[in-house]
Image (cartoon, rainbow, N blue to C red):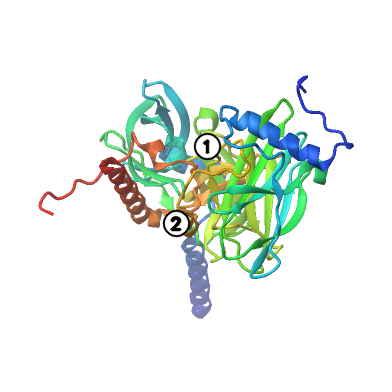
Amino acid sequence: MPGNNVRKFLSFLSLALLCCGEAKALEPDQVFKLISPSVWLVRTFDADGLPLSSGSAVVIHPYKLITNCHVLGRARSFSLVKDRVSYKGALEEVDIERDFCLISVADERFDAPAVKLADSDHLSVGQRVVTLGNPRALEMTLSDGLISRLQKNDEEQLEAIQTSAPFSPGSSGGGLFDMEGRLIGITQRINVSAGSQNLNFALPINWLRDLPARSKAQLDEYYAAAKGAAAK
Amino acid sequence: MSANAPVITRQESDFDMKRRVLLFASLLAGCAARPQAPVPATPLDYLAPNTGPRATLQIRSSQVAGVGMFSSFEDQRACKGTRMITNTKAAQNQLKASTALRADEPASLWFAYVAPGNRVCNVAMTFKPLKDRNYLVYANVTELACALLIQDISDPSNPKLEPTRFARTYVATSNHDGTHCAATDVDTQLAKPRKPNLSGLKMDDLKALLPAAPVEDAGK
């Protein structure tokens, strides 16, 4: 009957729409392919140009990357490195209180794609995640796990994403991604106190929204204090 | 343990213990200073306030192998005039005591510790206890350093780092009536909001990389 065919077609269409309207969770290897061009190794150097330390950074906009400020601590200069290609980096915005730093590459040849950003205010405990970074300068190390806990402050604001996806020194500034390859956090610290196992913490990516204002406030305060000290 | 390390026996009197703590603290923290007046053998005991607004202070420490003394001061702003609250002798190598502090005024706490081998650490902090609140100060001693952690435990299920706390710069003095902290504007420090710093950095640690300071408009 034509009526039945129409109904079948409509139900097929609605199923198809349902299917394609929802984002599809990828397998870890697919996520890796998607995000790996956007995660870079950060190498820092001292006043003599000698290597100081290393970390990770994620491209969030053309020529702009996010990392942890502590990766850059006490450095005189730094580079973004991938596949033996190196670009000189510059510090753009600083939030040392939240350990969020925005860095840039001026070189036009730096054509790394920006990752998609998730909304870190809408995460779930138990959600599968992957992390990509450069632990111990081991470039592009992927690991997976779950969101173990969402650490919130007294005002119910997200302060940290606790995950069972393991990371190590050098992972700092790397990305914590959902299974659609969207950036949900920046891998920042691990709990290494005695008896701790796999307690890893990332900073929520929504903090990026506050970065310009917080950076300006902190830099203004710093330069005002420096000016005051110089005037004495 | 070195040959010179103090051996503390249970038979020692409390007076001996105090004197030992003070002797070590004086010798190692301020040996170059010549006292202007005779050094008192022991500080006076802390007298907890029993009238007016008060807060409770619980004192605990990690297990210590050396000699530790926990004190407050007659003059809480200047850390002047040591008043001993407890020591490791009284608490058998782990500080455990409770006392009261005057509320709504600065309170300064000093932990002096002499580790086996005569390594010394001194740490002092000031905070502003509130009326009827319950505080825990925990002296943590490790191989490398000692630290004081002050928490508001009025709600024991939700201990919070005391927001008014700030570290004082310890000044060695051979006289217990002397001043143990570098001068600072205590009221300004107490009023300063304590911001968390996840990076552990100061802006100076990024000095070489920071964007240039904004240039002021010459016309202004």
Label 1 in the same subunit as label 2: no
Question: Residue at point 72% right, 40% down?
Answer: B68
Crowdedness near tag 2: few (<14), some (14–19) or many (≥20) residues, C-alpha within 10 Å = few
The quarter in which the C terminus of chain A is drawn is top left
Looking at the picture, does residue B68 appear above or below residue A83? below
SS at mark 2 in the image: helix
As rendered, which of B43 and B117 lies closer to the eye? Answer: B43
Looking at the picture, does residue A51 appear above or below residue A134? above
Viewer-nearest of discs 1 and 2? 2
> Which residue in the protein does label 1 denote?
A171
User: Residue B124 appears at what percent x and percent y?
Assistant: 59, 45
User: Residue A120 appears at what percent x and percent y?
Assistant: 49, 58
As rendered, which of A155 and B167 lies closer to the eye? Answer: B167
Q: CA distance from mark 1 to mark 2?
A: 39 Å
Q: Amino acid at mark 1?
A: Ser
Crowdedness near tag 1: few (<14), some (14–19) or many (≥20) residues, C-alpha within 10 Å = many
Question: Residue at point 47% right, 40% down?
Answer: A33
Q: Is residue A4 left or right of residue B134?
A: left
Mark count: 2
The circle drawn on residue B188 is 2
Disc 2 is attached to a residue of which chain? B
User: Residue B46 appears at what percent x and percent y?
Assistant: 70, 53
- Residue at the limit of the structure toward the left, as seen here: B219
